[in-house]
Amino acid sequence: MEEPSPIHKKYTIILIIAFLVFWSIPVEFGQENSFFQGYLIEKPVIRVRLGINLSKINIRSSSGMKIYEVKSNYKLVADDVDEVRIKGHKEKLSERFLIQVSQARDSEEAEVFAQDLRTKIENEVYLTENKENGSFQVKVGDFLTRGAALSFIKTLNQIGIKDTWILREEITERTSKPLWILVNDELKSLNKETVLYFIPSSKQSYLSFKGRDYRGIFVLEGSSSGLVLVNILSIEDYLRGVVPSEYSPYHYHEFQAHKAQAVAARTYAIKNLGSSEELGYDLCDTPKSQFYRGMSAEHPFSSKAVEETTGEVIVHRGKLINALYTSTCGGMTENIENVFEGKPLPYLKSTECVYESQKELSLKGKAAFLPVEVKGKNISREIAYLISWNIVPPKQSAAFYKEEASLKEALDWIQKAIILVGKKKELSVPENSALNLISLSNLLVNGFGWQDRVKNLLLEREVDFILRNFAELKEEERNKLAYLISEGIFSEDLANPGKGLTRAELAHYLAKVISKHRDFSHHGVFKRFDKGKIELERKSQNVSLTLSPNVLLLKNSEGRYSFPSQLYLLGGEDVRWIEKDGEIQLLEIVAPLMTNTLDRHSKVHRWQERKSREELEREINQYYPIGKLIDIKPRKRGVSGRVIRLWIKGSESEVVVAGLKIRYVLGLKETLFVIDREYDEEGRVSYFTFTGKGWGHGVGLCQVGAYGMAQAGANYREILKKYYRGIKIEKIY
């Protein structure tokens, strides 16, 4: 063969380079810009499924849209319309069931297993690749019902196959197509091969489907699973709807955490482009891919996080990572192979959800409050709030509140409370009058202007019922007293309404009256304390205040209150406070669990669920034919303590369940749990109590942990490098 000349080599190399450059340019919808009157969608582009197997589709536009019927060419169906309705085939989706019998880490291992299995059973044996975790699955099918699949599991058990999992798939016999479209009251029939494009008339316009607004354009076409509506838009616009959907800017208002979420979500989206190519889209809009609610979910806080990280993705050794994330990891994430049973990935390794740079902050307050009780109830918290509002004197002696109050004292306290709630009323009482429930009810009703309530919101029979044991009271006294009892301000078990009242009782009743108006405290999150200033987050805004020298510190531990002279905080605690002239008079800390894990603020950091044996039995038998449930026990735990192999024993069979399947079979929030048992008289387990931590699959970025880390001062790059090992953050466009 003749040796090519140098010049031939040169041009060959140029052609190859040109071909590679052209081939590497992503396909973009912008190639059709001229046809769609310059409507541009910036690269990279993503296709998001909004609905599947649709029959009645109603699409609106904010300020007009064009509709094209696409076959071999483009035909304008409607120009500048606000709303259209489309009728299509609602396919009756049938279903089939497969049994997953093996999940191998390489194709050769899976193929050997499949070939061996084909010699032992007559059913079809399939080999498929799971792109999510890079494993290869061997499946047995096809079964028309779940019951048939469950029965065949017994056959598989007899030949030594114990690790099984039932998969359900929807199938249709034909491809569904649109039938007709209604535009401006004109009905137009559609060709069975029609694909419809919905294009906003201007860049400022947007489309709506099922009450949600979306950027970009819509495409409606048929598929093997019925009519599919797809939203085509730029990935950056897509992320504007994903980040706040996945990560609430209201509950987790930390900017660096949202930037971390934006980069993780972008990486996941680009990594999974084309994952559902056969159905005409990339990702769906549910948490199965990433939760996406379009423009309706957008929030300026999240959008700014997306904008400031534009084009940034996470890579490991030059390749995009599988950027998995979980809601609450329970203090430690898990190795991916222990949950998803695929190949180990060096960047998805178990990580403790703690931050080495976390600082412990100390606040000092006034001396501790002694308990003050009314009928066995500690009302010290109520008194503390009254003190901070300057309604009662700042005396902290329990003996002071045990003493009897005077009518003049009650008048003074009530007058100050009236000013607090924004009313104007000067009260007076006859001289030499005594304080009791009757005189107090008169003061409260008159002072707070509740006369109309007493007159119009209480029936005579109600008064008779409430005060059935006090017929001797005057009518006016009866009505006011009965109203305050009906409102829960006074106790219904009155012994003697003419008896004197202690200061504690007066404070208790007055605090209840104030609570009937509104909450006069502020709510927010404790951020940090530095140089005498306390930084708090209130309604998504940071405020900086000074602690009063006489500040009252109140600790709320699941409704149990105490007044420590010093509080130790890590940041992120929920707080209530009373402020006056820029100074905090009272600070109530809703104390989290005693832990330093970053996800401690999550409501599901710890949880408990009690299930009867029968309930659990029904759930398990949907996946495995075990018969009567006898017992369940963890066989193996992962690095984080998660159960990664669970033994289930039944009257007909026993099975070992692995990985994330454990969560589905038991119907639990997470697989990080321990089991307690209750037994009946015959010694059988009657109830299983699962005490666990976390919510989700437990792999990758912990969303609540990222929030805690951001609160402690970490930036988004530190957060991502904490949960994804050995990665780099690169800007690819």
Image (spheres, rainbow, N blue to C red):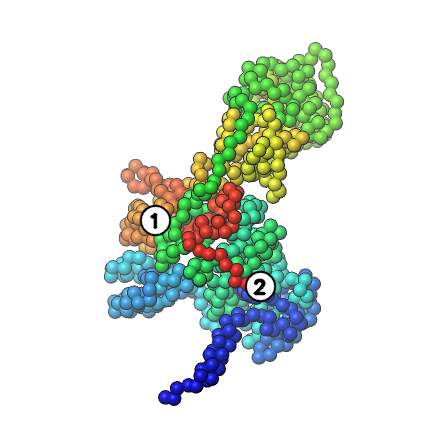
Residue identified by numbered label 2: 234
Q: Which residue lies at the image location 31% right of the left edge and 46% below the top edge? A: 633
Left or right: 390 as drawn, with respect to 623:
right
Please determine whether, in this image, residue 22 is positioned above or below residue 265.
below
In primary-sequence order, the first of circles 2 and 1 is: 2
The label on residue 452 is none
Q: Amino acid at mark 1?
A: Gly
Where is residue 653? Give x, y as percent.
Answer: 28, 53
Farthest top residue? Answer: 432
Q: Amino acid at mark 2?
A: Ser
Please determine whether, in this image, residue 648 is positioned above or below residue 536.
below
Where is residue 264? Give x, y as percent.
Answer: 49, 55
Which quadrant holds the C terminus? bottom right
Where is residue 197? Give x, y as percent.
Answer: 60, 70
Looking at the image, do the residues carrying marks 2 and 1 touch, with CB atoms under 8 Å apart? no
| Quadrant in the rendering for residue 60 | bottom right
Q: Observer-nearest residue: 345 or 283?
A: 345
Left or right: 443 as drawn, with respect to 677:
right
